[in-house]
Structures are given as C-alpha cells and as structure tokens.
Amino acid sequence: MKKILALVMACFFMTSVAYAADDCANRGTLDERFCDENKDLVADTPKDQKKWKDPKTLVFTYTPVEDPAVYKDAFADFQKYLSEATGKKVIYYTVQSNAAEVEAMRSGRLHIAGFSTGPTGFAVNLAGYVPIAVKGYEEGFQGYNLIVVTKKDSDIKSLDDLKGKRVAHTSASSNSGNLAPRAIFPEHGIVPDKDYTVVYSGKHDQSILGVAHGDYDAAPVASDVFKRMAAAGRINADDFRIVFTSPKFPTSSFGYASDLNPELVKKIVDAFYAYRFTPAMKETFGGADRFYPITYMEDWAVIRNIADSTGTSYNQAGLKKMAAKDAAKAAKKKAKK
C-alpha cells in the first residue's frame, strides 16, 4: 500500500511543472498548471487550443461517499442522456477514495464527475475541476446538515456529552464528516482529538453502521446519507438519537474538467441543466429532481471558510496528507479481515 501511494503521489508531483499554465496573469490558489484570469476561482479553458481535449469516450463517476455500485446504477439513465447529448460514449469509472477521484481527473482519466462537498476544493485547485451544479429542485439546490448521531439508548444527549468518548469521523477531506466538526464544535466547547478520541471510519455509512453496532459512541455525518440509508432499509432511524444539527451545506457538486473542448463543455453543461431525474433517482436522492446551477465562488464560500478555519489547504501537500490517511485506513481495514 505504501509503495502504491508513493508511486501515485510521485506521478502527481512530477506532472505539475510539465503542465504549468503559460503566461498566466492570475492563478490565485490554483495549482501552477492552471490559470484563473477571470478570477472566478476555477481553472480557465487552456489558451492553447492544442491542449483542448475532445475524447471519443467520456468517463464519469460519483463520489465514493457510500457503496460505489449503488451510484453506478443510479446514474445509468443520466449517462445515457449525456451520451445522446454529446454524441459520445459515456462510461462509469468506480473510485474507492476521494484522493483517487481527484488524481483521476488531474491525470486526464476522468472528464465529468460528482465530488463530495469537502473534496470539491481539492478537485478545483489540483485537478482543474469546474463545478456547475448540485442536486436540487426548481426553487433551489438540495442541501444537507452535519448531524451527530448516537444510539437511542446512549447517555450522550448533547455535544458536551462527547467528552471522553470514541467518536467516528469519516475521512480527512470530508466536510460534514471531519472539517465542519473541527470548525464548529469548538464554538460549542468541544474540541475533537482533545475532548474526545477521533477514529476515522472511511465513509459516512460506515460511521453510521459503526454507531449502530457499538463500534463508536457517536459520529458526525451528513444528514442526507443518514436519510438515504433509513429510506433504503439499511438502518432503522428510530434506533438513533440526533444530538446536534448544523446549518445547511450544499451537497456534492457536479462538473467537468477545464481542459475539455469548449464546444463539448457546452453540450455537457446543457445536458446537466436540461435533464430531469427518473423516479428511481428522485427516490435515491431524497426527492431532488434535477441538477441545479451553482458556482464555486459563491456557493462554496462557506465550505472554503470551514477549510480555512481548520488549516486545510487545497494544495498538493493537503492532498498528500488526505491520500496518506486514506491509505492507512484501507490498510487497517484490510488487516481486520
């Protein structure tokens, strides 16, 4: 696992100089291979048309927030629609970690994707990802809350009761599963790692199931994941107690790689905004019926602020740290089997 991680990160760093943007007047916080001259915080289309990509097959994926197989099926109809809109074959590429998803787009193997709320910043800065939508409704986008769940018969009834407990965070880059708790809980007198023991579970569903099985005393998770698991019968919501609910955050973003041919980009964007979810997708995604337009500059401001307050940098060092934690969790999980 360590050798694989080292190889991935070595390739990641070695490509930076080779792909650096030329004659860039403004780069902002983006990686050196990208440019942001219109200052909208996302990568511009390359000035050199020779760098525009127009692949015969478009590769799409969705964040590995839960079981990847569930979402491969959930997006099947949209993939068909996207294929018809672009005139290209669209395939689903399964990723197992947030870091792997970022690297897949950065390396050019991934063209269109849905990134979790927290990792969206890494994808924007390091992979040239351009978020354009979130799941939503006619009147606005679908949001979610950070909630803290514990077992219904637990003695934990407030954040203060987390002191001295074993609490599951999901992954280093997760907004509701790690970054938001670290930014918000101290305002309520609770400091993760100091007041309670943090144990990384890997995913939101694993945190929730871990609480249900008694592996963890409590867990901060995304409310939409909790609701989907209850609706699917994977958990009984009545077996849990929610002891904290945060303000609303935007859900996973959807977008494309900035180096795609602008004509292709227009077809992709138009397809996202015109598509309407099937009944099965609406059920899977909590009633959302469309991809609602957003911008990274405006709609991700609260998420960037949380990242800043926790010292999280959307740069190579930050991704390397995230990838290392992902690898350590995977190795630990494998060792238990």
Image (spheres, helix red, strand yellow):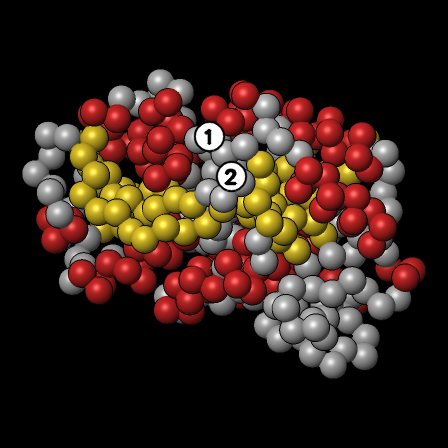
- Graded by Cα atoms within 10 Å as few (under 14), some (14 to 19) or many (20 or more), the crowding at tag 1 reads some
Residue 76 in view here: yes
Element assignment for label 2:
strand
Front-lying residue, 256 or 14: 256
Front-lying residue, 206 or 90: 90
Front-lying residue, 10 or 314: 314
In the image: residue 26, left or right of residue 56: left
- Identity of the residue drawn at 64% across and 37% down: 61
Badge 2 vs badge 1, beta-carbon distance below 8 Å:
yes
- Identity of the residue drawn at 12% across and 53% down: 160
Residue 333 location in percent, x, y? 41, 35
- Graded by Cα atoms within 10 Å as few (under 14), some (14 to 19) or many (20 or more), the crowding at tag 2 reads some
Residue under pointer 2: 137
In which quadrant is the C terminus drawn?
top left
The mark total stands at 2
Residue 85 location in percent, x, y? 80, 35
In this view, which residue lies farthest toward the front?
139
Which one is earlier in the sequence, the residue at label 2 or at label 1?
2
Element assignment for label 1:
loop
Residue under pointer 1: 287
Front-lying residue, 194 or 154: 154
Residue 161 location in percent, x, y? 11, 48
Residue 180 location in percent, x, y? 35, 56
